[in-house]
Amino acid sequence: MPDKRQVRLSFGRAAARYDQYADLQRRAGLALLQRLDIAPDDIRLVLDVGSGTGYFLPRLANRFPRARLVAVDLAEEMLEVGRGRLAGAQAVCGDAEALPFAAGCADVAYSNLALQWCGSLQRPLTEVARVLRPGGVVAVGLFGADTLVELRQAWAAVDGYRRVNEFVTADDLRQVLERAGFASIDIQTRREVVEYPSVRELMRELKGLGAHNVSGGRPRHMTGKTALARMEAAYRERMGGGSIQATYEILGALACRT
């Protein structure tokens, strides 16, 4: 289970440099937003849950020009970076597992690659269902179970610690959405394989995004140079030398509140 305090600290520290590393996150979020094909006229309140630096606020404003936008994030530093993106949006420092909104107040909830950092996916999606009106729509993007599989296997050759975050399958996501009170669930899965000059460049990007290992099974001591070198060697061996690749599985779900 992710350590929420560690999540807040990691993303807070990453806020200032997050956007320079977030190409994948932007592509995933835009693909999810393009699928959000609902009539905009009756949409009055849109929540961006886990809004980060607010990249999608102007795009949500264009999609729903009559709606009030509220950006919600656990890290105040992320919200500070995002304040300049859309002056008309309200910024709320809040926890997706306990959203500070009245039941049935929102028409749309959008969340891109954020909820996997919660302690339990069931809790934030149940909260999203609570704050959506009946017939309201959630658009949620998450990393899937095969994300960073190469890095996970390279660390497994070093020791038995859980050094890479674990993510959900599409079946897991569907079941969670159903239990939360959603129907008409449409989940699409896609993979991106990204090439990096070295393992260190991959690790630098993950650090820049704030995507540290925050699972409960992570080692509580500093990773030594010897262990890191062994992991890098195992990764390069898997790749056959030269540049390395990392797989990202991205789940995108649309669903309606019953």
Image (cartoon, helix red, strand yellow):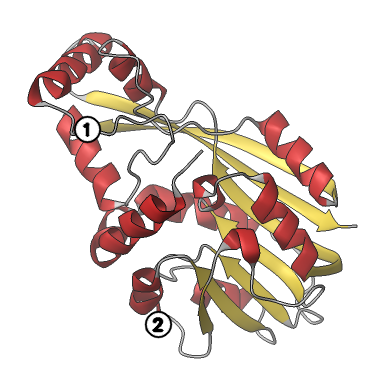
The secondary element bearing badge 1 is classed as loop
Residue 2 picture location, percent across and down: 47, 42
Above or below, 119 against 235 in this view is below
**Residue labelled with disc 1:** 221
Above or below, 50 against 167 in this view is below
Q: Mark 2 to mark 1: distance in Å?
A: 36 Å
Residue 141 picture location, percent across and down: 58, 49
Q: Nearer the viewer, residue 225 or 81?
A: 225
Residue 98 picture location, percent across and down: 64, 64
Above or below, 36 against 227 in this view is below
Which three-letter amino acid code belongs to the residue tagged 1? Answer: His
Above or below, 200 against 14 in this view is above
**Residue placed furthest toward the front:** 220
Quadrant where the C terminus is found in the figure: bottom right
| Residue positioned 82% across, 44% down in the render | 179
Q: Nearer the viewer, residue 78 or 221?
A: 221
**Residue labelled with disc 2:** 83
* 121 left or right, relative to 234: right
The secondary element bearing badge 2 is classed as loop
Which three-letter amino acid code belongs to the residue tagged 2? Answer: Arg
**Residue placed furthest toward the bottom:** 88
Marker disc for residue 113: none
